[in-house]
Image (cartoon, rainbow, N blue to C red):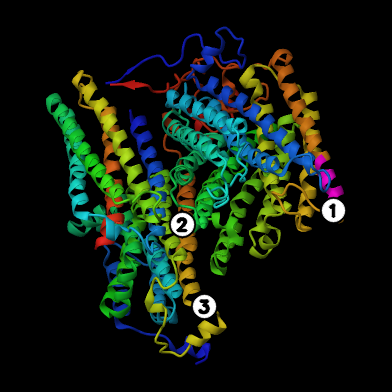
Amino acid sequence: MSSRIPLVPENAVPLPSLKANNGLLSWVSSIDHKQIGIMYLIITLIYFLLGGLEALLIRVQLAHPGNDFLTPELYNQLFTMHGTTMIFFVVMPFLIGVGVYLLPLMIGARDMAFPRLNALSFWLFFFGGILLYYSFFTQSGAPDVGWFAYAPLSEKPFSLNKGPTYWALGLLASGIGSVASGLNNVVTILTMRTPGMTMRRIPLFVWMMLVTSLLLVFVIPIITAAFAMMLLDSILGATFFTPAHGGSAILWQHFFWGFGHPEVYILILPAFGIISEVIPVFSRKPIYGYEFVAASTVAIGLLSLGVWAHHMFAVGLGNAANAYFSLASMLIAIPTGVKVLNWVATMWGGRINFATPMLFGTAFIIEFVVGGLTGVAIASVPIDWVVTDSYFIVAHFHYAIFGGSVFAIFAGVYYWFPKFTGRMLSETLGKWHFWLTVIGFNMTFFIQHFLGVMGMPRRTYTYYDMPYWGSMNLISTIGAMILGLSVLIFVWNILVSLRHGRPAGDNPWNAWTLEWATTSPPAVENFELVPPVRGRRPLWDLAHPDMPDEPGAKTV
Amino acid sequence: MANNRMLVGFFIASESIFFLMLILAYVNFHGSVTDGPTAVNSLNPVVTGIFSLFLFASSFTIWLAGKSLRNKNHFMLKVWILATIVLGAVFIFGQGLEWSGLLDKNITISRNVFGTTFFTLTGFHGFHVCVGLIMLSLLLGLALAGDFKGPKSDAVECISLYWHFVDGVWVVVFSVIYLWAFL
Amino acid sequence: MSVLHFLGTAWSFEPWAVIFALALIASYAALPGSRLNGKSLLFASGIFLMVLALVSPLDYLGRNYLFSAHMVQHILLLLVIPLMLLSGIPEKAAEKALALPIAGGVMKFLGNPIPAWLLGVGSMWVWHMPSLHDTVMKNENLYIAQQISFVLTGVIFWWPVFAPVKSGRLAPLAATLYLASACLGCTILGMLITFAGAGLYPAYANPADPAGILSYIRNDLCITPGVDQQIGGLTMWVPGCLIYLAASMVTIARWYASPEPDTVNIPAGEGSIAKAGSYVRD
């Protein structure tokens, strides 16, 4: 039979300080899920600042028509790196990192099912990012082909520099890391739950991480194969995506979006999970329609696999194909709408406490609905044909990914920071951060809807002085600056609160899931004893033995 | 532990999607080669078919290895793992022969889409076979060191699961590349 | 010929379809302990829809003009109708039928997820191989065999998810994976048909036009053979997958509706030790 060896060095300290007792080595060699989670969060914060800086440079260049702040070549590199960074090295790893930190705590486990695999995932992500950013220091510069790297632009005759090769290699490495964490999450959730924590009682964040992880497992290999083909094209002279030699550029689009559309849901489903934890706690009510939120997640996950061609309406797949994909894409609005209704119904009649996590949670609902509605609009082929490749699309996906995922990420950081560090983030700075984010974000992106409809093309380093374009772009740029300021306040808040924040205690928000049952930050073993789980809100049941969530639990 | 087998199961599912994409790429370009090498005019299904039999046989021997372990027959466990390695190595040798024959005729990955898709698909499969051979060799080393007491071992079960998968992929790849062209 | 006239006359009351329907009804009636109730109504509607799919102008169009019409019929016969038939079988009757010596054993074996999946997805793939489909279009007997096999393999496919006997059903998460993987199989085939060049199924390229509506289809509806094939492939792909998806929603709904089995099995006392991650050496 099997013999177990200790998993974590006894001296591992789960506080995000490199100066802690044992220095850098205890972090680099760690296989503790909490330390790995914290490392994910720190690295993604760094990439968030980098990606944000790239965005600000782009906005400065676009501040007025005919600007020459950036060369066209550098502009192309910056928007490529901005998109790639934000998607693959900020939102995705942040959500994976929060998952790695919280999943074992939420299901009452000691660690992930495979701690070493967990560390491997992190380091693949880490070095993948370094590989990508190393391209800036090469002679030819960073990749300049967009985050979608359409062939044949990304292929040899058109891309003689090595940028796209670094891009594919970096994403290949971090993608394999993502598959590994997906596998680890799935097995952890399915096998490591504490007694009583049945699959129908797991917190919704865990449920959504399960669906996301399954998507990671089944969807990342699509792009892994495509990256492999792209690398063979550029290194060995294969001809997958070069039409001049018998290949097919459309095939790249199919492969890329076959991955790329489910990827959108990989970015948003864990964010839904965060919101589904935050909103009930700050409304002092159990989530309304747990079952509907859970089932609609599965529906979204499955639907997301079959609608990628709506990114390709302008390619010319034929009217029949366009019509079917248009219909299927609109269907996604149903399960998503179910979720929004559930969150609103949870807030309805609740005693709402608008602390910073809840502010971001509430704003998430509003901003994400805007992104969702424009999404339904461009799922209709004629509208897509008008606005495709324009700033309308830029506005749409920023409302979905920034207004959606990133707002949820902020909500999650304010919510769980006390658990991660033992200290509260400053509410005052938090409110400054929140309001500047809301103002800056909407100022930057709402106006881009209009610019898009007026015909301003995306991915172009400058534009002609058309009526109103200059002033509208200037407004957008000022908004971006405000957004940048808000991020600085956020970082300042973290740095200050780490040292001087109010001590949090075990459960500062009076929340109900198991991670709040242990100390903040949790000890190496997570729990001395996991409280008995007799319903979906174990800590509520513990505090109110006379009126548990599940009536049957009372008699036990 | 059920954990390990579950992990390998999901890993195999993930890998299946990877191979599915390579196969779809092959299928996509199947009819589009108008001149130059194609499956019909440059491959030899009989020779490859014979080497494939070695790979299929190795699935059987790894199954026997697991069975020997369940019966606590440690000697036969080692014999069957060794047999699996030998059979897999013969298959890889056969693939090497086929590749060098093609390269001699200047059929390369960059010649046309047939070369591109053929070498990519068989190459990635061969890579997986090699990874499997490395894992089997580790298994053999551990078995020789007396690590497996039986009747159960996750290491043996997981690696044989992976090996069956590599074998199953070849059934599909062989059908798509060779049988489709010649039947 | 006007469209209305076509819809009025293109019915083909083929005896085999009626016989097959009667045979199904007879075996339903012969099930030990079956009686008329709401479930039999579901079964009867399934039979009605099946007969309709087999004798209506849809069948005529699918055999003579449009691949897409064939595909609609195919989805009805393989996915929709078998589900209605299966859901119409009462639990008690099915239990008794499964206890029968040979028939019960065969059904128990076929109802296992792997054979059921292979039959359900396989009948989709095999019957749509272009050469076989072409042969079927010319051969009446093969055509009958094809239609009947759609219904039968469809019933077998749904068995692991919607078996009338609860013990025959997969656990909800496993059922979702079962359905999702079948959806993948159907997606890939639909995708291949959609994006393959026109003329994959030559029988539909130049129909003999027995009813004289070809010019209406080609010129007024603008359905060229290429568009026809695309609609066919997409019908398999998108609505086909939506059926699997809806089915998995039903399994999840059923799961949440059923009582929690281990409510009583939680350990008493203060709590339990957390499970550790595994690093296993044998």
Report the Cα–Cα distance between label 2 and label 3: 33 Å
Q: What predominant SS class does the magenta segment belong to?
A: helix
Number of the front mark, 1 or 2: 2
Residue C179 visible in the picture: yes
Label 2 CA crowd tier, 10 Å (few <14, some 14–19, many 20+): some
The residue carrying mark 1 is A465
* Picture residue at 16% right of the left edge, 27% below the top: B78
**Is A375 or C224 nearer to us in this picture?**
C224
Report the Cα–Cα distance between label 3 and label 1: 46 Å
Residue A543 coordinates in the image, percent (x, y): 60, 23
The residue carrying mark 3 is C223
* Picture residue at 61% right of the left edge, 17% below the top: A16
Q: Secondary structure at mark 3?
A: loop
Q: Amino acid at mark 1?
A: Asp
In the rendered structure, the residue with mark 2 lies on which chain? A
Q: Secondary structure at mark 1?
A: loop
The residue carrying mark 2 is A245
Q: Is residue A470 magenta?
A: yes
Number of the front mark, 3 or 1: 1
Q: Amino acid at mark 3?
A: Ile
